[in-house]
Image (spheres, rainbow, N blue to C red):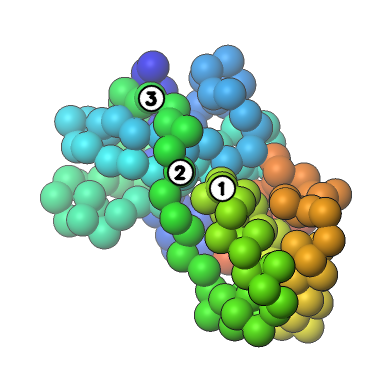
Amino acid sequence: MTLDAVVTTVDGQLIAKIAKEQSKERLPSRGQVYVEGTMNGYRFAKVLEPDGYWSHWFRFDREYMKEFDVRDGDVLRLEVTVSKNWPEPDVPKDFADGIAAASEKVRQKWHDITPMARWEWIRWVNSTNSLDTRAIRIEKSVSKLDGKHRRPCCFNLAACTDPELMKNGRLKDA
């Protein structure tokens, strides 16, 4: 499928925002979506993040930025396929330590859940700037994994959760 993404700067970071109509009509979820494809001929695989406005966005890889002259306002053409083969997420050290210190049941469940589910847990833990709230979320994640939960509950998957670029669950304006 073809998607158009507008390059924009949010708090000094260069990102690309998928056109809202295309996101809504062509992508299978308002939450994160893993895609593989090409962007102006450059091969990439990326998790598209929700923006809290029912669309998606992504950060640029340094390699791409070095190879191409990408500027604010540019429109990129993406040829993508939605993939169900999610990559393993980077687990923040504090969260990894919490899982490692938990019961065997928690460690086994963490291993058994899908990479997409692990992305969701990490998004929920990461979606705060408060270290106290973060610590509570890690503790709650371990507790929920020790119970019946395989994914975080009561969590708006369509919210923007990047603490550097969000305000009230929405991607900040450029």
Check if mark 1's residue and mark 2's residue have beta carbons within 8 Å. yes
Image position, residue 154 (x, y; %): 85, 49
Q: Identify the residue under disc 1.
A: 114
Where, quadrant-wise, is the N terminus in this rendering? top left
Q: Identify the residue under disc 2.
A: 86
Residue at 45 percent across and 43 percent down: it is 86
Secondary structure beneath disc 1?
loop
Mark before the other along the chain sequence, 1 or 2? 2
Compared to residue 2, the image places residue 45 above or below, namely: below
Secondary structure beneath disc 2?
loop
CA gap, disc 2 and disc 3: 13 Å
Q: Identify the residue under disc 3.
A: 81
CA gap, disc 1 and disc 3: 20 Å
Mark before the other along the chain sequence, 2 or 3? 3
Q: Amino acid at mark 1?
A: Thr
Compared to residue 61, the image places residue 144 above or below, namely: below
Q: Is residue 94 visible?
A: no
Image position, residue 110 (x, y; %): 62, 61
Image position, residue 35 (x, y; %): 41, 34
Name the front one of labels 1 and 3.
1
Mark before the other along the chain sequence, 1 or 3? 3
Compared to residue 65, the image places residue 46 above or below, namely: above
Residue at 58 percent across and 66 percent down: it is 164
